[in-house]
Amino acid sequence: MSTTKLREDAMTIFRAGLAAVDPKTAVRRALSRDGEMLSCAGESYNLADFKDVVVIGAGKAGAPMAAAVEEILDGWLTTGVVNVKYGHLDKLKTIRIIEAGHPLPDQAGVRGAREIVQLAELAGEKVLLICLISGGGSALLPLPVGGVTLEEKQALTEKLLACGASINEINAVRKHISQVKGGQLARLASPATLITLILSDVIGDPLDVIASGPTAPDSSTFADVYEILQRYQIWDGLADSIRQRIQAGRDGEIADTPDSSDPAFFRTLNVVVANNRQAMTAAVEKAKDLGYNALMLSSCIEGETREVARVHAAIAREIVDSGNPLAPPACVISGGETTVTLRGDGKGGRNQEFVLAAALDIAGLQNVVILSAGTDGTDGPTDAAGAICDGETCERAGLAGLEPVRHLENNDAYPLFKQLGHLIVTGPTNTNVMDLRIILAGDDG
Amino acid sequence: MSTTKLREDAMTIFRAGLAAVDPKTAVRRALSRDGEMLSCAGESYNLADFKDVVVIGAGKAGAPMAAAVEEILDGWLTTGVVNVKYGHLDKLKTIRIIEAGHPLPDQAGVRGAREIVQLAELAGEKVLLICLISGGGSALLPLPVGGVTLEEKQALTEKLLACGASINEINAVRKHISQVKGGQLARLASPATLITLILSDVIGDPLDVIASGPTAPDSSTFADVYEILQRYQIWDGLADSIRQRIQAGRDGEIADTPDSSDPAFFRTLNVVVANNRQAMTAAVEKAKDLGYNALMLSSCIEGETREVARVHAAIAREIVDSGNPLAPPACVISGGETTVTLRGDGKGGRNQEFVLAAALDIAGLQNVVILSAGTDGTDGPTDAAGAICDGETCERAGLAGLEPVRHLENNDAYPLFKQLGHLIVTGPTNTNVMDLRIILAGDDG
């Protein structure tokens, strides 16, 4: 099997993964209508029971998700507002798409969030609310509690990051100075019937973490938040508005975020419509169609990308050497999202760095390609989604006067792969279920 | 399946892996005698053709390997000398076992190496030499070229390490100031018939790397060595004896290490009698016997141990969540050898640190255990071979007043696992084929 063929197959497999988590496809898979009967995740809703059907939501995939909902609920929708990232605007018939700031929230986001909250608050028992959540939904649905500015909230997040707080601790604090996060949007919407369709960009699909869980139960409390801020010794330096809010919560003057026993969730259905595992499953199926023995390694891969890459390279080597964990022609798919500890000042992203580290470890290996790319079509501050390498990549780099080890040390994978023509450029895919990595090992034929 | 049962099974599987690479077992598997016919790796030798059968060798597994050879060649052996590490002495009938320094070579090692070289040099066409090589064989067969002291050689190695030379570069240099490394022992032994039995402690079993390849072809040259020493700017600061040696080699006054075309190897057979993959294969078989679906991930795993552990934990999580890469009851085996970047001053080893990092990532997961242990029975400067954890390890640590994250940060896994009773203590196993890691995921039953 030639490397060219392996590269083509790897791209075909990657695209099959992407197609399975396309936001429109995902919404259509989860939500279907037959006359006045709407079905979602095994539940049925008679649309004739509702006075209004209203769409709300936030996230980078908001526009195509909304378009699919409009299509499915053609003629049944009353109104809708969905916040999306700048550049993701779409003109729909009923639902208004609002562009806002991401990753830094801005006033456009706040204005959209106010409209969304108003739709939720006004929705009575006779309203069906469909909420569309996807990656970036936290920054794209910014609504701090009264008196707290976006800047104060941002400053607090930075302080928490600087003192080494865990992401769970940071989320607990942020939920308690927001009007919508941590299930509070579901409480505002109650007693309406609420269906939330979620495109997951978090490992394991934790509902309370994706977009800070606006319609999911939250187990953290004002007491926890106070303890966290005291422990990291940032309570005293907080903005007055934030301290007063948390103090009022501790004193029982404000309701805490709703936990799973809260009546707010009696009529709430949270449904993950697309996630990393779905993309992997489709990729594995496509690999099998193409004649590969295929294996899903894990959708939960985390860790330092260059070290994770070494494990993947070791698996590639074992396939070639001994036919384990599966015999060639073989395809191993992994998902999740790795991290990069910056050491240099080069240009790249976690996927490109992964492929460069893997290239060093598979140097000289015949009949193997390794691909890694972000399902959102972007990888770090570059125009690429990722990259692809084979056993000759390092040699070709050397012939081109490039030093792969130096590029890796300097977090500078992009220029190397650009010069070799090994970048994967998809443009924005409108979806995001983290990354896909593909090892392909051909047979000798 | 209870965690207790999973732990027992993990230990049973680990022991099955160890048993497969026991030095005596390995030698008996590779070498067999039927009357005067000796068979090894498909080759046959008529012992009656030889005047003498002589055993030489060096390595930590030297004593049991030699004992097995004595047993197989009962009555046929003339003499033999094998260098082993202090504490690994054994009293054999014909072969003399000599204790020597490891990892730092000493004069006892040099004296033993001189005897070994003499046996090789004196061996004529009518001699069958059986050479036994195992981990540590490089330090245990120290014979610098004339005029170079062990201290000068050691100082050079340290300089090369300090300036960031690769292990391949360091090996190339060392081979060229040794009388035996880099195939030179095979050249000394020529025209005798030479069978080298190798217990591999290196990923991929590269014959020229294991114990610096005393009987394997070497492709590096005096010219390479000069270039390396110039490039790292340590040529000028070298001991005179070393500089003179390399200069003489460049001038063609001394023969270079023999490459694969050298007649020295016409009658040489290098056979890997045990390696990491054999241990893994036996472990996989035992897991299947115990009723597990079992998979060999890779025998080539390298990288920072805590990051490699995260990938293993992610695989465990995927098995539980989706039945991939294989359905429970499931066993995934990996091998190779990871590294630890020291950040703290605690007590532990790469296997214990692996298990601690994995424990953090599988915290709360039911029905899973993860084991990692060195096949030599030692892990870092501890009396343990490794450790074993499950989804409750972190909780139990917390209840015992221990903080797993702090112990990991401080490279201090040993006291934590000791207190929890999660250490694996085997004592010295006399073998070394790197590490074994075992993920077990039980079914719900």
Image (cartoon, coloured by chain):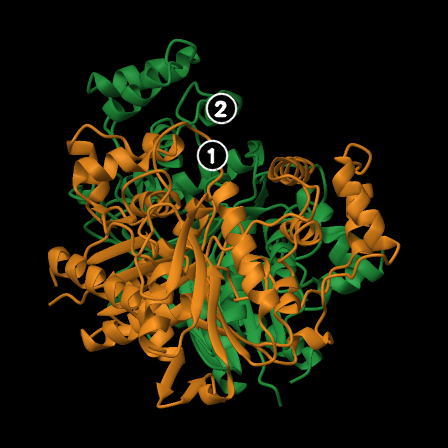
Chain colours: A green, B orange
Q: Is residue A78 visible?
A: no
Contact check, label 2 and label 1, Cβ < 8 Å: no
Q: Residue at x 31, y 58 (%)?
A: B317
Badge 1 element: loop
Disc 2 or disc 1, which is closer to the eye? 1
For disc 2, the marked residue is A162
B409, above or below B246, in the image = above
Crowding near pointer 1: few (<14 within 10 Å), some, many (20+)?
Answer: few
Residue type at mark 2 is Ala
Depth check: give the residue in front, B41 or B201. B41
Please say if A348 is above or below A281: above
Horizontally, residue B120 falls left or right of residue A410, namely left
- Quadrant placement of the N terminus of chain B: bottom left
> Residue reaching furthest right?
B251
| Residue B439: quadrant of the picture | bottom left
Does residue B380 appear anywhere in the picture? yes
Q: Could you say which quadrant of the image residue A247 lies in?
A: top left
Q: Chain of mark 1?
A: B
Per the image, label 2 sits on a secondary structure element best described as helix
Q: Position of residue A250 (x, y in %)?
A: 23, 19
Q: Which residue is under mark 1?
A: B342
**Local crowd size for mark 2, using a 10 Å CA cut-off: few (<14), some (14–19), many (≥20):** few
Residue B173 location (% of width, % of height): 70, 49
Viewer-side residue, A344 vs A67: A344
Q: Residue at x 26, y 62 (%)?
A: B14
The image position of residue A374, as x and y in percent, is 57, 57
Which residue is rendered at x = 40% and y = 74% of the image?
Answer: B77
